[in-house]
Amino acid sequence: MALVGTRYFDSVGSEAASPRVAGVPQTVGVLVASFRGTAHDGPMSTSRTHPLSAPIVGGGYALRAIAVPGSLDDLQGPLEGQVRLPHHLDWSARAVYDLSDERWRRLLYEIVLEEAATVEDLRTWINGEALLESWPHLYLPRVVRAAWEARHPALRERGAGAGEPRP
């Protein structure tokens, strides 16, 4: 039974009486309903009968543009020191990244590559040579890695390391 406005409909679309049934206690929660092939089985539906229930290939990254510069030489970000990313790139509790430590630099690169909305963000925070060296070790969503490797064959040649997502 599905509620539309203040009217109830049964599984074949006919108007139905209120769902109050004698002897069944009324509860507050999610109404499990089935209506013309669609099903809702809780706050997050696991049903595959609805046409919109199929996952989006590439996840949320498929819904927005991925910033990729025209040349790796354009990327002249810092290689040393401690840096703090702006809030629009890193909204986590991490405040400072020590770029002299390769692990911290990789983490910063992963965040910037995933979150950058403009090429200017990339130019500011990523160094092209260091990116090329780090590329096989970066853990990136497949769609992000594919966008960068499509534009820059040198990155594709470096490939993804063992255990890293591949396009």
Image (cartoon, rainbow, N blue to C red):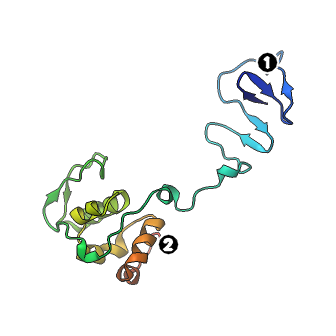
Q: Is residue 78 shown left or right of residue 30?
A: left
Label 1's element?
loop
Residue drawn at the location 58% of the way across and 57% of the way down: 56
How far separated are the C-alphas under marks 2 and 1? 52 Å
Query: As displayed, is residue 51 above or below residue 110?
Result: above
Location of mark 2 (residue): 167
Question: Residue 3: horizontal and vertical position, in percent?
Answer: 73, 27
Which residue sits furthest top?
A: 22
Residue drawn at the location 43% of the way across and 70% of the way down: 147
Q: Is residue 93 shown left or right of residue 54?
A: left
Can I make out residue 161 in this image? Answer: no
Tell me the quarter of the picture where residue 42 sits: top right
Say which label, 2 or 1, has the lower sequence index: 1
Q: Mark 2, residues whose alpha carbon is within 10 Å: few (<14), some, or many (≥20)?
A: some
**Number of marks present in the image shown:** 2
Quadrant where the N terminus sits is top right
Which residue sits furthest left?
A: 81
Name which residue type carries label 1. Answer: Arg
Q: Nearer the viewer, residue 119 or 155?
A: 119
Residue drawn at the location 86% of the way across and 30% of the way down: 14
Question: Residue 15: horizontal and vertical position, in percent?
Answer: 84, 26
Q: Mark 1, residues whose alpha carbon is within 10 Å: few (<14), some, or many (≥20)?
A: few
Question: Residue 23: horizontal and vertical position, in percent?
Answer: 82, 16
Location of mark 1 (residue): 20
- Dots 2, 1 in contact, CB < 8 A: no
